[in-house]
Image (cartoon, rainbow, N blue to C red):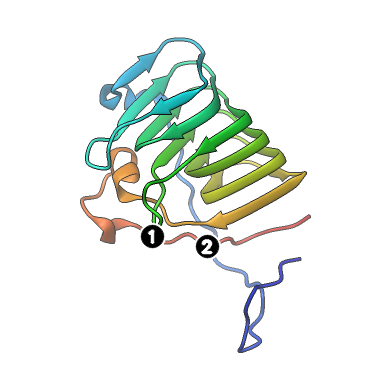
Amino acid sequence: RITPISNPENLPVHSQTSPIQIPTIIPENYLSIAYFIYYGNASFSGNLTLGTKENPKIIYVTGNLNLSGNISGYGIFIVKGTTNISGNVTISTPDENFNNVGIFSGGNINLSGNVTVNAQMFSNSTVNISGNVRLIGSLTSRGVVSVSGSTEILYKPTNSALTRPIFGGNNQSSLVEVNMIHFYE
């Protein structure tokens, strides 16, 4: 059950819309735009600083990606396998209006532990969220999204600097705002 924070006109809290066609991300198609390529699994812990808004670092991982620690700057992770974000993780943003990190995973995305993520996330498979997780951004899954524990999800629009390399487009007007269309417990 979803209860809006504010609903002064007492509008319905849900509605049915036409299905949204979710694109398939084929990670191999993005090898040519990668700044760094990690063959096999990759793990990042401690402090990781990515690029700038004008020049985001694009990191391609042919296996699974494991993130822990603090991540700052602008960047895109394109992962062929599963993405695990666990432990005490903070992905911070210098821009309060948009996200600075994009995570595109060919497999599952798993968030667990004490995790605060300012990111736009996309999974070709499922998303599993458990623990004390705070996601500020967007989450798209071609499969099931499973949520347990103390989880807070706050929508923040995607950043064209991070979607342009993946989906194309030349300006902010090429973006489409995504709304939650289905939720159940």
Q: Is residue 106 visible?
A: no
The image quarter containing residue 18 is bottom right
Pinpoint residue 94: horizontal percent, then vertical percent.
Answer: 37, 47
Q: What amino acid is found at the position of numbered circle 2 in the picture?
A: Asn
Most foreground residue, 156 or 116: 116
Q: Please indicate whether residue 17 sits to the left or right of residue 128 in the image.
A: left
Residue that badge 1 annotates: 176
The image quarter containing residue 185 is bottom right
Residue at 29% from the left image edge and 45% from the top image edge: 161
Residue at 71% from the left image edge and 71% from the top image edge: 3
Q: Is residue 67 visible?
A: yes
Most foreground residue, 115 or 2: 115
Q: What amino acid is found at the position of numbered circle 1 in the picture?
A: Val
Pinpoint residue 33: horizontal percent, then vertical percent.
Answer: 27, 27
Most foreground residue, 142 or 2: 2
Q: How many marks?
A: 2
Question: How crowded is the residue under tag 1: few (<14 C-alpha within 10 Å), some, or many (20+)?
Answer: few
Pinpoint residue 54: horizontal percent, then vertical percent.
Answer: 22, 41
Q: Give the answer, above or below, for where 124 lies relative to 83.
A: below
Question: How crowded is the residue under tag 2: few (<14 C-alpha within 10 Å), some, or many (20+)?
Answer: few
Q: Give the answer, above or below, for where 47 lies relative to 63.
A: below
- SS at badge 1: loop
Q: Is there CB contact under 8 Å for labels 2 and 1?
A: no
Residue at 52% from the left image edge and 62% from the top image edge: 179
Q: Is the N terminus in the top left, top right, bottom left or bottom right quadrant?
A: bottom right
Give the Cα separation between the discs numbered 2 and 1. Answer: 10 Å
Most foreground residue, 106 or 39: 39
Pinpoint residue 78: horizontal percent, then vertical percent.
Answer: 42, 28
Residue that badge 2 annotates: 179
